[in-house]
Amino acid sequence: MDKGMEEAGNQMSPAVQQSKTAYDIIRERFGDAISEFDANPTMPFFEVLDIARWVDIAFYMRDNSLLRFNAMACLSGVDYPAEEKLGIVCNFESIGHKTHKIAVKVKCRRDGGSIPSVSCVWHTANWHEREAYDMYGMVFEGHPDLRRILCPEDWTGFPLRKDYQVQETYHGIKVPY
Amino acid sequence: MGLLDARVSNRNVLVTSVDNVMNWARLSSLWPMGFGLACCAIEMMATNASNYDLERFGIFPRSSPRQSDLMIVAGTVTMKMAERVVTLYEQMPEPRYVLSMGSCSNCGGPYWKHGYHVLKGVDRIIPVDVFVPGCPPRPEALIGGLLKIQELIRMEGLGISRQDALKKLADKSVDPQQAIDQVRKVAVTA
């Protein structure tokens, strides 16, 4: 670690430092498959760059004895129209074992992109991924039951995309005001 | 006012029309369907509970649409729920009444623009007799709406359509501003 980074490290709050330690363990194993650590004081995170390895990373994060991220606290969807991408942000905690937290971002192409499903790693992800699919339309590969969860099954479009236009009618009922 | 306020002769005979008796019976036992859709349902439940005690009007929630003659649409009607609301409405026996409670079911409420999933007014799918504004309306407001339903029933009779009854009710209504001014004047002079 060079001097500049060490100084930056010293400025980190204890919580962020814990996240950094956890990140270093993952980085050591997966190298360039994940991005640099972002010491965001609210929620420190890293991005998965090689999304084909996302499930391996997930298993490692859950099962490694130093990490033990046994709880997926949240999985949110994000639309990045400028980058032509859709993404998810997952928040992880280690309940009953560690006090560290970390967030992971995974992105895919905006039209027809897909992200590997981690519902086999954390069962919480099952419904969360369905919700992200329902609202943003990214496909979760390997998901056991990828259906819409909130909108009606025959709804058109994905409501939380930035360029979403609501449909005129639904089953003969006018939708816009 | 009510049937029981009419003068009863000393032979315990009461002369009135069948319409009157029927209407009195129906408006004195309005049975709403016990279903709520959002936060308005909490106010509806509060109105049903002992503080506001709807039972004194003979209003008692039923768990089946087959047994109810009033539907209180209490809350946000989503597009997904809209078709279920129509089904429930169709299951109610006639004559049936609909009270739309709160801004959401009146017109979409806070979801009027960006709420892609919300029906912008329950009157788009079923005929509504009385709208109660508010977000959510206080129990007093809901009781006001229920009294309006009772008045509407009082306007009905053989050969009078629901449209005519609603028109009669509208003609009978007073301008709220006048009433407010009158109360204010009394308050100032007192």
Image: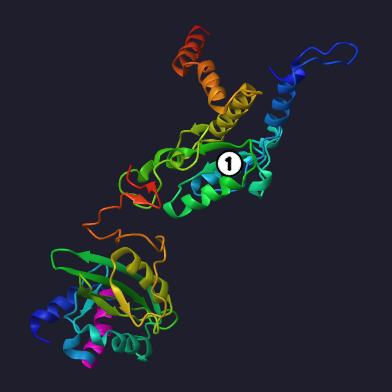
Residue found at x 18% / y 90%: A31
Q: Main secondary structure of the magenta part?
A: helix
Residue A36 lies, with reference to residue A160, above or below; the image says below
The answer to whether residue A25 is magenta is yes
Q: Give A20 or A103, whichever is nearer the viewer.
A: A103
Q: Give B14 or A63, whichever is nearer the viewer.
A: B14
Q: Where residue A8 sits in the image (x, y, percent)?
A: 14, 76
Q: Where residue B113 sits in the image (x, y, percent)?
A: 31, 45
Q: Give B108 or A12, whichever is nearer the viewer.
A: B108
The answer to whether residue B115 is magenta is no
Residue A31 lies, with reference to residue A74, above or below; the image says below
Q: Secondary structure at mark 1?
A: strand
Q: Residue furthest right?
A: B11
Q: Which residue is mark 1?
A: B71
Q: Residue furthest top?
A: B189
Q: Quadrant of the N terminus of chain B?
A: top right
Say what amino acid the circle numbered 1 marks: Met
Residue A112 lies, with reference to residue B98, above or below; the image says below
Residue extent of the magenta highlight = A15-29
